[in-house]
Image: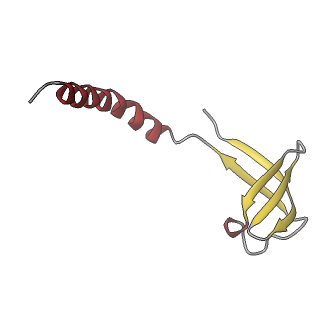
């Protein structure tokens, strides 16, 4: 899956939050500390969103093991000592 690229302009900065108006008129609230120091009202910005496929695959791999462990632990809790 290819990354999505979003473009827009900094509409305003309200304290710790920058309000970015995307080209499709969507408003995005972004931590101002994560913008470049030169970012100010009216500056064009672009950001990319992509999936972390490696982490996603790792989570899927861990899920069956976690489920099995939970089953084992739950069974042992229900059994008398």
Q: Which residue lies furthest to the left in this view?
A: 81
| Up-down relation of residue 6 to residue 18 (above or below) | above
Residue 75 x %, y %: 21, 24
Residue 70 x %, y %: 28, 30
Residue sitting nearer the eye, 4 or 32 = 32
Q: Which residue is drawn at 82% across and 59% down?
A: 19
| Up-down relation of residue 64 to residue 49 (above or below) | above
Q: In which quarter of the image is the C terminus?
A: top left
Q: Which residue is drawn at 45% across and 41% down?
A: 55
Q: Residue furthest front?
A: 80
Q: Quadrant of the N terminus?
A: top right
| Up-down relation of residue 22 to residue 13 (above or below) | above
Horizontal relation, residue 81 to residue 65: left or right: left
Q: How many labels does the image show?
A: 0
**Residue 41 falls in image quadrant:** bottom right
| Up-down relation of residue 51 to residue 75 (above or below) | below
**Residue 24 falls in image quadrant:** top right
Q: Which residue is drawn at 73% across and 58% down?
A: 30
**Residue 9 falls in image quadrant:** bottom right
Q: Which residue is drawn at 73% across and 45% down?
A: 5
Horizontal relation, residue 22 to residue 17: left or right: right
Residue 15 x %, y %: 78, 71
């Amino acid at each position: 899956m290819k990354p999505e690229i979003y473009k827009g302009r900094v509409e305003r900065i309200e304290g710790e939050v920058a309000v970015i108006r995307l080209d499709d008129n969507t408003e995005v609230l972004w931590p101002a500390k994560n913008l470049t120091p030169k970012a100010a009202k009216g500056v064009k910005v672009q950001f990319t969103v992509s999936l972390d496929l490696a982490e996603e695959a790792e989570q899927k791999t861990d899920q069956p093991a976690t489920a099995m462990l939970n089953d084992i632990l739950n069974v042992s809790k229900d059994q008398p000592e």
